[in-house]
């Protein structure tokens, strides 16, 4: 899964952990808890560490059941 500055994201099953688009800001393992959290909400806010790495997200929209 790649995530862009505007927090839109895309996945590719053939490249699950690869930065395959130079415009993306982060890469998240498709099989991770973080990816599941991203897929489970309409919108989210990014939580970065001091180095700019994505470490968590905070859902801000209606959660998908």
Image (cartoon, rainbow, N blue to C red):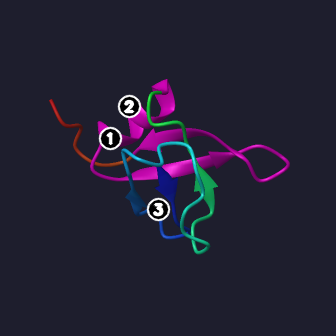
Along the line of sight, which residue is nearer the eye, 14 or 16? Answer: 14
Label total for image: 3
- Rendered image quadrant of residue 22: bottom right
Distance from disc 2 to disc 3, alpha carbons, whole Å, reads 15 Å
- Rendered image quadrant of residue 20: bottom right
* Residue labelled with disc 2: 36
- Marks 1 & 3, CB-CB < 8 Å contact: no
Distance from disc 1 to disc 3, alpha carbons, whole Å, reads 12 Å
- Marks 2 & 1, CB-CB < 8 Å contact: yes
* Residue labelled with disc 3: 7
Badge 1 marks a residue whose secondary structure is helix
- Give coordinates of residue 62: x percent, y percent: 22, 43
- Give coordinates of residue 10: x percent, y percent: 38, 58
Q: Would residue 64 appear left or right of 4 to someone viewing this image?
A: left
Indicate whether 36 appears above or below 9: above
Q: Residue at horizontal 40%, vertical 41%?
A: 38
Residue found at the far bottom of this picture: 23
Q: Residue at horizontal 48%, vertical 70%?
A: 6
- Give coordinates of residue 42: x percent, y percent: 27, 50
Badge 3 marks a residue whose secondary structure is loop
Q: Does label 1 or label 3 sit earlier along the sequence?
A: 3
Start-end of magenta stretch: 32-59
Along the line of sight, which residue is nearer the eye, 31 or 59? Answer: 31
- Label placed on residue 9: none
């Amino acid at each position: 899964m790649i995530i862009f500055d505007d927090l839109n994201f895309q996945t590719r099953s053939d490249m699950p952990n690869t930065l395959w688009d130079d415009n993306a800001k982060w890469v998240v393992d498709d099989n991770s808890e973080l990816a599941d959290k991203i897929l489970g909400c309409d919108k989210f806010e990014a939580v970065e560490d001091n180095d700019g790495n994505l470490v968590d997200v905070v859902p801000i929209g209606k959660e998908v059941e």
